[in-house]
Structure formats: C-alpha cells, structure tokens
Image (cartoon, coloured by chain):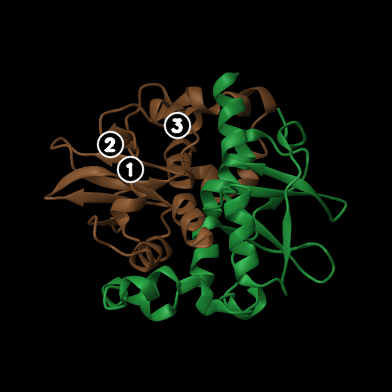
Chain colours: A green, B brown
Amino acid sequence: MRARDLLADFPTVALDSPVLEAARLLADQDLPGLIVVGDDGSPFTILPGTEVLRLAVPAYCQDDPALARVVDEAHADAFLHGLGVRTVREALPRHRRELPVTDPGATVLELAALMARTRSPLVAILEDGRLTGAVTLQALLDRVLAS
Amino acid sequence: MRARDLLADFPTVALDSPVLEAARLLADQDLPGLIVVGDDGSPFTILPGTEVLRLAVPAYCQDDPALARVVDEAHADAFLHGLGVRTVREALPRHRRELPVTDPGATVLELAALMARTRSPLVAILEDGRLTGAVTLQALLDRVLAS
C-alpha cells in the first residue's frame, strides 16, 4: 500500500484567505487540518486544526487561558468576529512548521512516521512538484487496521 | 455559550489498554484524539490523533522518516502488528503533556484558548473531579460559526 492508494482530493486555502474563511472550511468539511498554498499553488504550510484555531485566538489568551475567563460570555461567543478580514498570511507565526509532504510512492510507515514527527493529521502528496491531494490520519488508520 | 452546552459523551481508554486497541477506537469512531484515564477513572493524559500514532510508530522512523523508506512495502503495511500487546502505559513518553481539562462553565473563548495552547483538538470537562465528557474542536467551531 502506497500514498497513491490512500490519496484523496483535499481543499486548499490561499495565504490571502481570511482566517475566518479558513476556520469555516475546516468546520464545514470536517477536516483534520488545512493545506495553505502559496502564490505558486504549492503548499506553503500545512496546519492541523488546532493550529488553525491558534490563528484565531488572541495571543494573550493562549499564553494564559485564565485571562480568557475575564471576558464575558457574550464577548467570548463572538471572538471569531474580532478577526475581521485578517488573513492567514497576517496571522501565521513567523516560524514556519516542517512541511509534511511526500510523494505518491511513500509507504504507510513513511506516512505514519511523517504524521507522527510533524504532528500533522494530514500529509500533502506532491508529484513533480504539483499538489495531487492528501492522505489523512483517519484514511491511513482505516486502511492499515483493515489489512 | 458554555462548555456544558457543547459537551458530548466521549469514549476513554485505560492506561493498560493495548496501543492497537486505542488506534482502533480512534479510527472506528473517527475521533480527533483520545482521553486516557488512570486507575482512578480521571484523565491521565489526552492525546491528539497524531500523538496516538506516535505511540505506534517506531522511534527510529520518527527521528528520521527516510529510514522508514528502507522498510519494504509488505513490512510497512504490517507496522501496527509489530506492536503486539504493548500498552498505552508502556508507550507513553516520559514527559506528560499539559492536560486540556476545564469545568462546565468555561466559555468558548476559554475552550478555544485551551485547545490552541495545548494543541489538543479535544478538551475534557470535569465536574467535581469527575469526567463528564469532552468538547471537540469541530463542535466548538460549528457552534461558534453558526452563532
């Protein structure tokens, strides 16, 4: 079994997409994470769902969740609206994550090792430098446990 | 909106469950992660899906995914079987993760901050020290984006 056997189409967001739109894509399609593509269409970064959330949560709350407790319920409910039109590019941390990408010939052990190492529940598959889809942790486990 | 409004039952695994059983639970129920309970029934650790995978992937492959490439396809396909009856307790890293737990009164901003900070797509909810369920990143985003 190789990456090409587990590959599925996967939606992408652009660096200039609003963070709110990225969060909506993640929620609506029940995705484990997002592939953010650069201006050339190749993966710029791949974000697990919790990293997408990090783009949307004010930094002071992440450093000390107790500070989130002082925000009243009505304002807390609306925290995503505080994002306005802030883009993914603007919200990304300066330090770029190790990119979980491989080729269609990768075995399930390579895919699993890459997911484990980069803590990414999805791996993008590139062929001749072109994004051809992704393998998710769920798809990998489903197939490996069935075999 | 509070944690109690987003709460859902969530399965748990015991420290002495085999890693293979934990991986199967994650895959079969399409969970974003697992709550591992200690001998007293309270959460011992909470593992995102990628951390569950880390319990199952040989360490030498995680350090250097290129080493996974030298394992042939048939052996790669069977990597989970190499686990045998290894338990979660035996496979857990020595360093324990910050526990993403809170109480039923937590706001969505507190929940989001906790998920972002601990990089956990689920937060366990405790009431009087007893586990009452969990809030997932998907449930949180679904409700926050709908409101």
**Location of mark 2 (residue):** B89
Residue under numbered circle 1: B92
Q: Position of residue A92 (x, y in %)?
A: 59, 75
* Dot in front, 2 or 3: 3
Residue underneath mark 3: B23
Side (left or right) of B72 relative to B19: right
Q: Position of residue A35 (x, y in %)?
A: 68, 58
Please give the name of the residue rendered at 53% of the width and 56% of the height, measured from the top-left corner. A49
Using the image as rendered, state which of residue B95 and residue B134 is in the foreground: B134
Amino acid type indicated by mark 3:
Ala
Q: CA distance from mark 2 to mark 3?
A: 14 Å
Q: Is residue B52 above or below residue B18?
A: below
N-terminal of the pair, mark 3 or mark 1, is: 3
Q: Nearer the viewer, residue B82 or A111?
A: A111
- Secondary structure, mark 1, is loop
Q: Is residue B103 left or right of residue A60?
A: left
